Image (cartoon, rainbow, N blue to C red):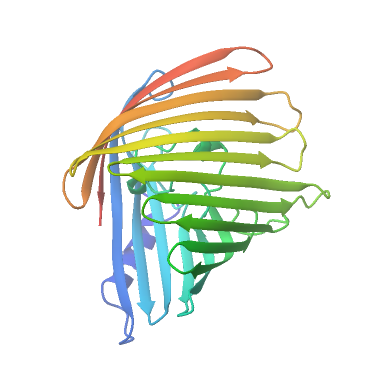
Amino acid sequence: MFKRNGIAVVFAAVALASGSVHAADVAAKAGGFVDAQFNMSNVGRNNSFSVNDAALYLSAESGSTSFNIDLPFSSDLAGSGDNTFTFATTKAQAYVQKKYDSGGSWKLGQFDTIFGFEANDSPDIQFSHQGLVFANILPLTHTGLEYTHTFGKDLTLNLLVANRFNHGHADGLDMDYGAQLVFKNDSFHLFGGVLLGKDHASSNMNSLIDILAGVTQGNLTLDGGLDLTKSAAAADTGLGILANVAYTVSKDVGLGVRGELLSKVTDTTNVTRFQQIGVTVGPQFTLSSAAKAKVDYSLVSTTLVDGGSSVTSHAAALAVVYKI
């Protein structure tokens, strides 16, 4: 069963998408995906099948306005071991969007972050799981207002004002303000962005600087990313460096390698600092126009800087993702 009355929400959403829209100029769509996996690891839940990620997508469009709803769910790996799903708990989306012929558009509501190399939903990433930088440095969602303007076909500006990232309401915190400039063509892309938010209890700023660059030559794509975070507490800082290689062997087979370095302070007292080095490698196979299989191996070495201790984890995964 879904937590938080999830089944009732899903049935209501499906009913909406299947024909209860009466306006003649409204086009409604329903979609979604399932990411089913088998994982092996020397830490945590060692050998386990799970629904790693899944979602129901709903949207409707009328002229230049639209709404989008993304209701994610997955196996409750933190629970008691029964067959429950967590429902819309961390990365749900629901927003209204308006587009203009001039190249501008805005969205209002809760939506995926504009920062980072890897996307929130597993069909949109290369490996079975996102990496260290995604998990430890970057926001998932913003609840607020985003404005996007495209200049020609290669240059895009994104502007953002929102609650503190990953917060569905202000909760007494000051707003985040973000900006991102994107240059992208068939062979090269460069993303540069910043997210700032003042700490409500002091004059200090929380900040994220996000830089991505990549090149594509034939079947080979190389990407690199640098992320720097600074919390209002002087001790709470983070550094993430990512390098990703994607090679298309054939129309049905791809290969990938991801390497990452993460350095992070986990609390404001500077008691626990850790560094991680992670490597993920594996192939991806196209099963059909809607389905893909991923097989990968990950190694993560974690070092506690102050205590000097270290641990190495190994994990392997088989994922089959179907998206419509």
Q: Front-most of 228 and 151?
A: 151
* 271 lies above or below 116: above
Residue 108 in view here: yes
At a point 46% along the width and 59% down the height, the residue shown is 93
How many labels were placed on the picture? 0
Q: Front-most of 257 and 84?
A: 257
Residue 117 in view here: no
At a point 37% along the width and 76% down the height, the residue shown is 61
- Dividing the picture into quadrants, the one containing residue 276 is top right
At a point 58% along the width and 46% down the height, the residue shown is 210
Quadrant (top left/top right/bottom left/bottom right) for the C terminus = bottom left
Question: Is residue 157 found left or right of 70 in the rendered image?
Answer: right
At a point 45% along the width and 51% down the height, the residue shown is 189
Q: Percent from the top left, x then y, of residue 313?
A: 44, 19
Q: Residue furthest bottom?
A: 24
* 185 lies above or below 265: below
Q: Percent from the top left, x then y, of residue 261?
A: 53, 28
Q: Percent from the top left, x then y, of residue 1?
A: 35, 48
- Dividing the picture into quadrants, the one containing residue 218 is top left
Q: Percent from the top left, x then y, of residue 85?
A: 38, 45
